[in-house]
Image (cartoon, helix red, strand yellow):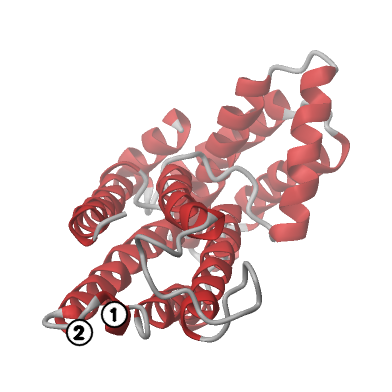
Amino acid sequence: MDNLTAFLLDTIWIVSFALAMLYNIARRKDLKPIIWLAGILAVVYALNHGTTACLFDGKSFRQHVTFQYILWSGACALIVVAALAFRFATNTRLYWVTYAVFFVLAIDVLGNVLMHVDQNVVGLNDWGEPNLLWSKDRWWLWYWYSAQSNINNAVMLTLLFVPVGLEIGFMKQTTNIKKVFKSLLNGFNFFRFIGGVNNAYNRVDVIQDMINAMPIEQQAQAQSLLCSAKELLYRQDETGVDHLDGVNLLLDAAAHVALHHPATAQAQYATALNAKSR
């Protein structure tokens, strides 16, 4: 694509990632890893966009491609490094969405490396001289790169809005996805699984905050109920059997115990309502 089109598309993606961050802050503020991921995507893309524009100023297409793809590869790698740094600095879990974005970024890195090699080292279509002219030397790799870079951005943007579901690692999430489709084939309600499990995990986090506000010596009963609910969620993940009714009963009981603790009842009332609504 021409440089003007690429510039406009880059701007659209930057604004879109920023809006995704604001959406998650407003609607899913408990999903801090997703909020940070959206923010990192917007900031790194903006920095790379500005740097590329400054370096390209006054340079020819030939000069531009000598650094363009290296910068984009570095930007993709920086997003992964920044997300992992946030993970270890804050000791927060990473949802499967983050790992999916990492996979998409790896495809983007591969595309940029191939384009850099094709235009600066050796022509990959004939293993001869590097392909130099945009109008003459274009081949399917160049079209694939233009398409996949924008498709990848659309995929990452979409992922920032989907339910996080179960978030216990990439390989574990692969199992979760298999369980979803297995349950679907067995007549299990797909949307109830996705929405219900996501809501249950959100409630677990909120109720845990309520329990943490109680005196330590009085947390045992509520914590026991919460642990039982979490165990049922893990078993649902492993077996595909629907335990959501039992999970929600246990979560209601845990919220009730935490809510009616005399020292914190008033302060936790709004939080409990929020937990039950999730």
Q: Is residue 36 left or right of residue 258?
A: left
Residue occupying the point 58% across, 63% down:
107
Indicate the quadrant where residue 225 lies: top right
- Tell me residue 77's x, y (percent): 49, 78
Q: Is residue 111 left or right of residue 184?
A: left
Amino acid type, residue under disc 2 in the picture:
Leu
One can see residue 232 in this view: no
- Residues at circles 2 and 1 in contact by the CB criterion of under 8 Å: yes
Quarter containing the N terminus: bottom left
- Tell me residue 78's x, y (percent): 43, 80
Secondary structure category for the residue under label 2: helix
Residue occupying the point 40% across, 62% down:
136
Q: Residues within 10 Å of mark 1 (few under 14, many from 20)?
A: some
Residue 55's disc number: 2
Residue 64's disc number: 1
Above-or-below relation of 36 to 113: above
Q: Earlier in the sequence, mark 2 or mark 1?
A: 2
Amino acid type, residue under disc 1 in the picture:
His
Q: Looking at this view, is 111 or 85 the one in front?
A: 111
One can see residue 273 in this view: yes
Q: Residue furthest left?
A: 58
Q: Looking at this view, is 247 or 268 the one in front?
A: 247
